[in-house]
Image (cartoon, grey):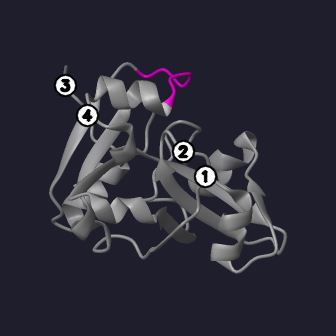
Amino acid sequence: MIQEKTNVMRLLEQKKISYESFAYEADPTKTGEEIAAILNEDPDKVFKTLVTQAKSGGYYVFVIPVNAELDLKKAAKAAGEKAVSMLKQKELLPLTGYVHGGCSPIGMKKFYKTMFHESMKEYDSIYFSAGKVGYQVKVAVSDIEKIIRYTTGDIITG
């Protein structure tokens, strides 16, 4: 199967960042754990991108392991906000340029303050969406800062 290039892959190439890309049957109902299994990878190393809106109106992007839940209280505190809530699915595409299940922290229409869960630092590389349902990229953790500004923190439940 010839794999099409996504904008995320093009952006990584523009920055001369090496990555591996993976394609699987595009099924937006697949869970992150199922995608990790398809990749034959530990779900702790496969990350999902969640977009939130704060009470102040600001938007924040949180990138966490697929088998974890975002703790909205911890996320708000990390963002310096009173509260954040998950963005409604129908608002995702107009805001980010991505659809649910294909949202990547790289290449959104506009840059939003982004925070990865601190566990990313435990790995040499992590996986996240390549910006389209059915596509993932594996990028060295040390290379992510070359393409996007982000912080890390404890933002998951448990």
Precedes in sequence: disc 4 or disc 1: 4
The amino acid at mark 4 is Phe
> In this figure, which residue is indicated by the disc labeled 3?
2
Q: Is residue 61 above or below residue 57?
A: above
Q: Earlier in the sequence, mark 1 or mark 2?
A: 2
**Residue type highlighted by circle 2:** Ala
Q: Is residue 6 above or below residue 62?
A: above
In this rendering, position of residue 89 left or right of residue 25: right
> In front of the other: label 1 or label 2?
1
**Residue bounds of the magenta highlight:** 26-31
Tell me the element at label 4. Answer: strand
Residue 76 on image: x %, y %: 71, 69
Residue 87 place in picture, x, y as percent: 73, 51
> What is the crowding at mark 4: few (fewer than 14 residues within 10 Å), some, or many (at least 20)?
some
Residue marked by disc 1: 158
Q: Quadrant of residue 120?
A: bottom left
Q: Is residue 53 magenta?
A: no
Q: Seen in the image, is 100 located left or right of residue 86? A: left
Residue beneath the point at 61% across and 46% down: 69
Dot 2: within a 10 Å radius of its alpha carbon, few (fewer than 14), some, or many (20 or more) residues? some
CB under 8 Å between discs 1 and 2: yes
- Numbered mark located on residue 68 in the image: 2
